[in-house]
Amino acid sequence: MMAVTIALGSACSAARFELRAAPARPFDVAIVPGCPSEDDGSLSRCQKGRALWAARLWELGWADHFITSGSAVYTPYVEAEALAAALTALGVPASRIYLEPNALHTDENLYYSLQIARSLGFHRIVVASNGATFDCLMLEDWGQPASAYTMDIEWVKARGAKSGALLDGVRARRAGDWVPLVERERARTRVSGRHRPPSFLLYPGLGLMRTNGERWIPAGAPLAPPRRTWAAALAGG
């Protein structure tokens, strides 16, 4: 019963982050959490959906910059780069996209991206994804007010039918040093001295941690947050 109550409470509190109309002024940055590419490096349905949804914020003038997040996790293709390539194919300038290429899980997507945003002086943050309101709860845990444009699946399907062909030829870069996720997690544990619980245990437990006044802090964040744009990456910088 306690688990159900915590879950319902989290859902109710998460709803307050949700936006459906234009902000009073554009957000400094939109965080776009990663998901895996296909085995040949082409964009997955998840990546196409998130890119289409995030690009809408640019088209509407609701976000000035983007942070695409994700390492090469389940496939040898860097998720942050795949999303960045998709956004540029949809018209977002490469100079407005920052890469977060280290995250292995959603909590890391958000925490590592937050460190980049803060290093750049970005204070007004929005999350563009499916499940984005729960992402905002984690950002709030780390002292960062945030808002969410949770993906409108029907809108994405309709837009994909019109402009999805722009994304069909996008291919992500294959990471030459890729190793399976389990090995990378073991290496992080050795370095940090902390074992990360599996996501299916960690995420439901975050609500209980909040009620106890505890906060989850992901390990493995770079000491100096990367501030590399997709434009710089394309230029080889």
Image: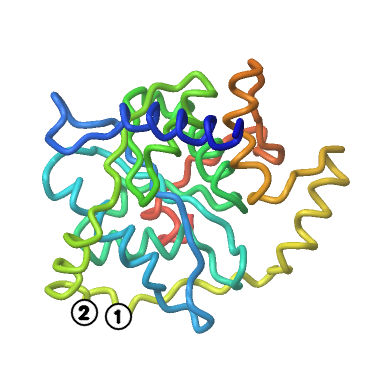
**Label 1 sits on residue:** 168
Q: Residues within 10 Å of mark 2 (few under 14, many from 20)?
A: few
Q: Position of residue 90 (x, y in %)?
A: 21, 63
Above or below, comparing residue 119 to residue 222 in the picture: above
In space, the residues marked 2 and 1 are separated at their CA atoms by 5 Å
Asked if the residues shown at circle 2 and circle 1 are in contact, with their CB atoms under 8 angstroms apart, the answer is yes
Looking at the picture, which amino acid does disc 1 mark? Asp
Find residue 46 and report its horizontal and vertical position in percent: 39, 66
Q: How many marks?
A: 2
Q: Which residue is mark 2?
A: 165
- The quarter holding residue 43 reads bottom left
x, y percent for residue 176: 65, 72
Q: Which residue in the rendered view is the most extreme toward the bottom? A: 40
Q: What element does badge 2 sit on?
A: helix
Residue 66 placement (x, y as % from top left): 34, 44
Taking the image as shown, residue 34 lies to the left or right of residue 94, namely right
- SS at badge 1: helix
Residue closer to the observer: 30 or 45: 45
Give 234 or 138, whichever is nearer the viewer: 138
Q: Residue at 64% across / 36% down in the picture?
A: 205
155 above or below 108?
below
Quadrant position of residue 147: top left
Q: Residue at x 63, y 24 (%)?
A: 215
